[in-house]
Image (cartoon, helix red, strand yellow):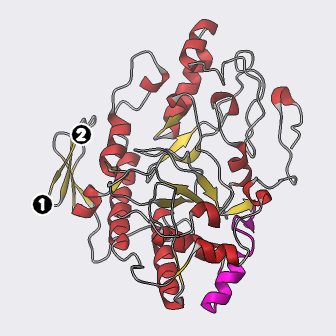
């Protein structure tokens, strides 16, 4: 995938408000299943004071004595953890880097930098655009979308920014440079919704040292084709969260477990001749298209990364060491879906619009039209005043 060297707008121009990736400060607050997180919480709460502090793993930002507000939309304790941990927070889904949905304990007392502004706008209408780290000469997408809250982790390279599609809950106030959508609608002769702009970015975004570049075509037909492709790609990445249809490979190519996976698989391999994924001793899934096995982000193979996060050994005596004793059935289901998602994504990426030689709508043109630079207010989070939030020690938070 080539870097963009022309005057293509950056995603930062088109969607001005962005948030830095989450920084948890401790890995044990994330797990592939919710039961593990509840078991870790119970172990933390049962520990004696000095043991609890060691298990917690204090940082400069968080200790068991930290007093912080609750995360927006989460009903968790705000008393100091050392004094009153309270009940286990209900785990929530988290996009833990690209293509890996895990679970998170949504307790602000546990997270170094939880980015409350993201939680404030996360709902069933929201899309999160996540820029991928720039790694020169390595394959992989520049931009991905998710319907669940992302942590913004990048498997390689510098993490990118997280850009919500909407600045307020309920799909209100698009995170789009003022004046851009009317300008595009006039240029292309058709209405342009915020989702259309993000769909185009998903299909056309290219990596560059300056950030995620999004070339805009002058040709309405090229725009329409790219938007249609981007919506298909987004539906795969969102795993049918908007369409209600889970991803499926065409032509009866659905992967199946051909030989039962072992209780504790320790390695992953691929048989190209048989199109089979080999899981531990004897486990076998097929058919697995080569495109799914080879799919990479930032040069890192996604299937290997997903598997390694679930099987890598943890230090004894840590909360990370609390995990399922055997491979859960739900992980197998998630692995089958991941194979499908990666295969579909790879096939769609092969259809990306070819903008070589095409007339572009450049940054200079957007500046001339008064769209750029985006006003400073568009780069700050919007005020969300229609919901109350609990501050430290049960106080009412001031927003």
Residue 172 on the magenta span? yes
When the figure is inspected, residue 74 is found, relative to residue 348, above or below; the finding is above
Q: Which residue is mark 1?
A: 274
Horizontal and vertical percent for residue 108? 69, 33
Q: Report crowding for label 2: few under 14, some 14 to 19, many 20 or more residues within 10 A (C-alpha).
A: some
Please give the range of residues in magenta. Answer: 169-192
When the figure is inspected, residue 178 is found, relative to residue 39, above or below; the finding is below
> Helix or strand or loop: what does disc 1 sit on?
loop
Horizontal and vertical percent for residue 232? 47, 75
- Residue in the image at 60% along x and 74% along y: 197
Query: Viewed as shown, does residue 81 lie left or right of 222?
Result: right
When the figure is inspected, residue 145 is found, relative to residue 197, above or below; the finding is above
Q: Which residue is mark 2?
A: 262
Query: Viewed as shown, does residue 363 lie left or right of 234?
Result: right
Upstream in sequence: badge 1 or badge 2: 2
Q: Is residue 371 visible?
A: yes
- Residue in the image at 70% along x and 15% along y: 82
When the figure is inspected, residue 369 is found, relative to residue 112, above or below; the finding is below
Of residue 33 and residue 128, the one placed in the foreground of this image is: 128
Pair 1/2: label in front: 1
């Amino acid at each position: 995938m080539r870097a963009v060297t022309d005057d293509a707008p950056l995603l930062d121009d088109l969607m001005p408000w962005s948030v830095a990736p989450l920084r948890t400060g401790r890995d044990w607050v994330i797990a592939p299943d919710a039961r593990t997180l509840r078991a870790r919480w119970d172990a933390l709460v049962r520990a004696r004071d000095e043991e609890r502090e060691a298990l917690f793993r204090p940082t400069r930002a968080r200790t068991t004595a930290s007093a912080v507000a609750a995360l927006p939309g989460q009903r968790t304790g705000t008393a100091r953890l050392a004094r009153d941990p309270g009940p286990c927070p209900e785990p929530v889904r988290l996009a833990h880097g690209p293509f890996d949905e895990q679970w998170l304990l949504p307790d602000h007392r546990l997270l170094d930098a939880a980015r409350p502004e993201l939680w404030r706008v996360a709902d069933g209408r929201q899309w999160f655009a996540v820029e991928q780290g720039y790694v020169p000469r390595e394959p992989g997408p520049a931009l991905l979308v998710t319907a669940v809250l992302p942590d913004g982790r990048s498997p390689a390279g510098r993490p990118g920014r997280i850009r919500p599609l909407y600045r307020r809950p309920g799909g209100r106030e698009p995170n789009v440079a003022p004046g851009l959508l009317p300008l595009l609608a006039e240029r292309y002769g058709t209405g342009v919704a915020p989702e259309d702009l993000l769909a185009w970015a998903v299909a056309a975004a290219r990596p560059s040292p300056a950030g995620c570049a999004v070339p805009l075509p002058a040709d309405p037909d090229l725009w329409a084709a790219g938007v249609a492709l981007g919506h298909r790609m987004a539906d795969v990445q969102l795993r049918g969260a908007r369409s209600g249809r889970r991803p499926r490979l065409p032509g009866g190519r659905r992967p199946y477990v051909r030989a039962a996976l072992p209780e504790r698989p320790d390695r992953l391999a691929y048989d190209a001749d048989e199109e089979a994924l080999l899981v531990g001793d004897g486990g076998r899934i097929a058919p697995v298209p080569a495109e799914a096995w080879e799919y990479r982000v930032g040069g890192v193979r996604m299937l290997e990364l997903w598997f390694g996060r679930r099987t890598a050994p943890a230090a004894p005596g840590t909360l990370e060491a609390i995990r399922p004793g055997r491979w859960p059935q739900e992980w197998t289901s998630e692995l089958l879906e991941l194979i499908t998602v990666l295969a579909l994504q790879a096939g769609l990426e092969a259809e990306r619009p070819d903008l070589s030689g095409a007339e572009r709508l450049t940054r200079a043109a957007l500046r001339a039209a008064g769209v750029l630079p985006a006003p400073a207010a568009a780069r700050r989070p919007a005020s969300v005043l229609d919901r109350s939030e609990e501050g430290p020690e049960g106080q009412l938070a001031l927003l």
